[in-house]
């Protein structure tokens, strides 16, 4: 008899747990369905879960040394560089609802993914903001970057991610043709591969090695400031928020910068990232020559071959042609589109 009672008690406990799990699932499902935020305001609004504020994070942790000073917020979606999927809505949605429905990642494979809304008041496209309402949305994935072209798998992930987002908001997406977008991505990647330029100089000590602190002291005189990590310095752009013009780097094998013995210093220029008006390559040559003179060094390429002034002139002429070509294709060096494509 005691065994029977124990068995009945156990069975009852299992049934209660099953019922509790069912009601929790049902409640969660109903909450998701209410996120759409009907315009009449009669539906119950769910609490918005906390999300990672990417803009706030980037304000405290720069993505790379070339991003000092910090870049402005990410540029808007553009049909020239993004595959776009317009999303129609039956009724306007709040910025809170859009933010709550966004996927946890802002990438599709190796490509940036973004969603923008058409602001009901300003009639402008923008990233969703709280306390705003949006009459239409659009999702986009970048067609190409330095990781390569958007492929079939990434496009399929873009469709799935966008559809899941739309399901929460009761939106209807209009996806572009995959074949044409992937072909467009390959063309853009081909253009980027043929017109990318990252230039590097090496400053080598002729005789005595340098200490890290000595290198920092000499570079600071030319306007360089400390980078994001040890052994990195950057030359800031003339416009606040733009990527650094040049990066200077050296290997730090000791915590004591005064004791580190170094014979090589690297100077780097990421051409498409820097505005043409910064005269980046000319300043790179001036910096290399000045450091070589003051530190008793010689300017070479990555293979250790000395770079005479004539070689620098040849590079300068080729860069002028590159700048012109980028501008003709709407990817002017330092522009938002160029910085996205060559990243």
Image: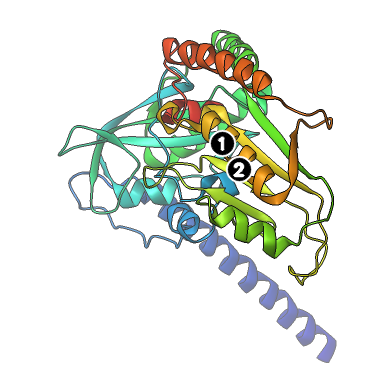
Q: Are marks 1 and 2 in contact (CB under 8 Å)?
A: yes
Q: Position of residue 14 (x, y in %)?
A: 69, 72
How far, Cα to Cα, is label 1 from label 2?
A: 6 Å
Horizontal placement of 140 versus 15: left or right? left
Colour scheme = rainbow
Q: Position of residue 66 (x, y in %)?
A: 56, 44
Residue bearing mark 2: 290
SS state under label 2:
helix
SS state under label 1:
helix
Task: Give the quarter of the figure containing the C terminus.
Answer: top right
Quarter of the image for residue 307 reads top right
- Is any part of residue 30 visible from this angle? yes
Q: Residue shown at 69%/49% (left/top)?
A: 249
Q: Position of residue 130 (x, y in %)?
A: 29, 53
Q: Residue shown at 43%/53% (left/top)?
A: 55
Q: Residue shown at 55%/10% (left/top)?
A: 184
With respect to residue 29, does 203 lie above or below?
above
Residue bearing mark 1: 286
Residue sitting farthest toward the bottom = 2
Nearer-the-camera pick, 198 or 24:
198
Numbered mark located on residue 263 in the image: none
Task: Give the quarter of the figure containing the N terminus.
Answer: bottom right
Crowd band around label 1 with a 10 angstrom C-alpha radius: few (<14), some (14–19), many (20+): few
């Amino acid at each position: 008899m005691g065994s029977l009672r124990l068995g009945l008690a156990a069975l009852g406990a299992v049934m209660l747990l099953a019922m509790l799990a069912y009601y929790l699932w049902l409640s969660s499902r109903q909450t998701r369905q209410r996120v759409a935020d009907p315009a009449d305001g009669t539906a119950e609004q769910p609490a918005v879960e906390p999300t990672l504020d990417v803009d706030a994070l980037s304000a405290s942790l720069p993505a790379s040394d070339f991003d000092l000073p910090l870049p402005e917020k990410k540029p808007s979606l553009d049909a020239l560089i993004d595959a776009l999927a317009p999303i129609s809505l039956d009724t306007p949605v709040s910025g809170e609802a859009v933010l709550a429905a966004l996927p946890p990642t802002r990438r599709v494979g190796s490509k940036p993914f973004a969603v923008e809304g058409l602001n009901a008041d300003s009639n402008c496209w923008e990233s969703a903001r709280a306390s705003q309402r949006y009459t239409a949305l659009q999702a986009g994935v970048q067609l190409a970057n330095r990781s390569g072209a958007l492929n079939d798998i990434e496009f399929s992930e873009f469709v799935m991610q966008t559809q899941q987002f739309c399901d929460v908001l009761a939106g209807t997406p209009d996806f572009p043709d995959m074949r044409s977008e992937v072909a467009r991505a390959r063309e853009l990647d081909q253009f980027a591969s043929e017109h990318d330029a990252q230039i590097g100089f090496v400053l080598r000590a002729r005789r005595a090695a340098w200490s890290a602190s000595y290198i920092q002291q000499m570079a600071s005189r030319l306007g360089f400031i400390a980078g994001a990590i040890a052994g990195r310095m950057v030359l800031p752009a003339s416009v606040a928020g733009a990527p650094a013009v040049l990066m200077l780097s050296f290997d730090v094998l000791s915590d004591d910068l005064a004791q580190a013995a170094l014979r090589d210093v690297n100077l780097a220029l990421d051409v498409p990232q820097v505005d043409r008006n910064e005269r980046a390559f000319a300043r790179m040559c001036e910096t290399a020559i000045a450091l070589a003179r003051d530190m008793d060094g010689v300017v070479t390429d990555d293979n250790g071959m000395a770079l005479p002034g004539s070689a620098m002139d040849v590079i300068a002429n080729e860069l002028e042609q590159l700048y012109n070509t980028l501008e003709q294709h709407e990817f002017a060096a330092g522009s938002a589109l160029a910085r996205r494509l060559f990243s």
